[in-house]
């Protein structure tokens, strides 16, 4: 039995699609009603890291688990690992972050990830760490302004980032959960090239077949936007991460996806093409303007 935590999340829902059909599968989420289409054989359970009884139920009979946590300052990883040891879980594949390996990264989010990686390494359970660069899917935050104005607004238009398609992260996670040879390994995951926001905007425009304009945000504007979505300490961590990108810290390209899956990592152009509908005007809007 494999347990997927964060089953409604960006990577978790893709992992469900990647796992072989004959693998017994259990999906853990705080709100089971949010789980969409899943394999008929998959079991969906409600679970919360702060509820030991729910973790015990979710982990019963599980041999391998995909672990995703995202709340800075919580004890989520410690709680899950304690429950996993008690349940006899043999293998955990954890979603971490590429910044952990950067000695210049000392923001809140990176420190939390480092601490959580340490907990897993010291747990006594066989582990694999996934350290992806930024998700290409983060660019869905551009969708509203692209649809309404034909504009992309972002920090650091010329700073490159070797962002990765979440589907490729999930494909590597599926291999790590179902194949031997991944124990005790760290998989750094990127896309096939490092692109700036300006370059991504140009590729997105080509995919959509419409002109798009890029407008670079200033730091104060970016901070204000982040504070509307996140607590102050998380917003400052994200700004600190952006400063490292400006210094070139996120441009390195890895071949890990190719090495593990046997196929190249997906390009941003491919990701944009597969998600073009999120950026295109609704059919009714197009008709009204015609």
Image (tube, rainbow, N blue to C red):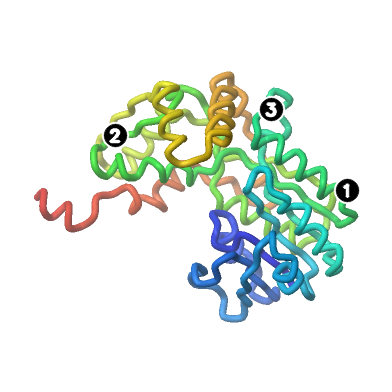
Q: Are marks 2 and 3 in contact (CB under 8 Å)?
A: no
Where does the image place residue 120, in percent across and percent down from the top left?
81, 50
Determine whether 160 is above or below 109 in the image. above
| Crowd class of label 1 (few under 14; some 14 to 19; many from 20; radius 10 Å) | few
Numbered disc 2: secondary structure: strand
| Residue corresponding to mark 3 | 106
Mark 1 to mark 2 CA distance (whole Å):
47 Å
- In primary-sequence order, the first of circles 2 and 3 is 3
Q: Residue at x 59, y 31 (%)?
A: 237
Query: Quick check: 222 above or below 65?
Result: above
What residue is at 56 percent from the left and 43 percent from the top?
164
**Outermost residue to the right:** 124
**Which residue has dot 2 on it?**
151
Asked if residue 96 lies left or right of residue 195, the reply is right
Task: Calculate the distance from the C-alpha at mark 2 to the C-alpha at mark 3.
Answer: 32 Å
Residue on which the image places disc 1: 122
Crowd around label 3: few <14 · some 14–19 · many ≥20 (10 Å)? some
């Amino acid at each position: 039995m494999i347990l997927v935590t964060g089953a409604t999340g960006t990577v978790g829902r893709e992992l469900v699609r990647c796992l072989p059909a004959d693998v017994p599968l259990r999906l853990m989420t705080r709100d089971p009603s949010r789980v969409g289409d899943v394999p008929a054989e998959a079991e969906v359970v409600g679970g919360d890291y702060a509820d030991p009884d729910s973790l015990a139920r979710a982990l019963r009979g599980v041999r391998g688990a995909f672990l995703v946590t995202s709340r800075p300052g919580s004890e989520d990883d410690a709680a899950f690992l304690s429950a996993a040891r008690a349940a006899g879980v043999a293998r955990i594949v954890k979603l971490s972050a590429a910044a952990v390996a950067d000695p210049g990264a000392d923001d809140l989010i990176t420190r939390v990830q480092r601490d959580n990686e340490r907990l897993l390494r010291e747990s006594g359970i066989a582990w694999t760490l996934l350290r992806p660069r930024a998700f290409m899917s983060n660019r869905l935050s551009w969708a509203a302004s692209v649809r309404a104005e034909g504009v992309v607004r972002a920090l650091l238009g010329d700073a490159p980032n070797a962002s990765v398609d979440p589907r490729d992260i999930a494909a590597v996670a599926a291999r790590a959960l179902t194949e031997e040879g991944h124990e005790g390994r760290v998989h750094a995951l990127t896309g096939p090239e490092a692109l700036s926001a300006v370059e991504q905007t140009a590729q997105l425009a080509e995919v959509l077949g419409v002109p798009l304009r890029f407008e670079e945000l200033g730091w104060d504007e970016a901070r204000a936007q982040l504070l509307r979505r996140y607590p102050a300490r998380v917003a400052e961590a994200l700004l600190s991460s952006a400063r490292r990108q400006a210094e070139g810290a996120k441009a390195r390209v890895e071949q890990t996806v190719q090495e593990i899956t046997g196929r190249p990592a997906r390009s941003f152009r491919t990701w944009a093409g597969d998600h073009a509908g999120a950026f295109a005007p609704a059919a009714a809007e197009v008709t009204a303007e015609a």
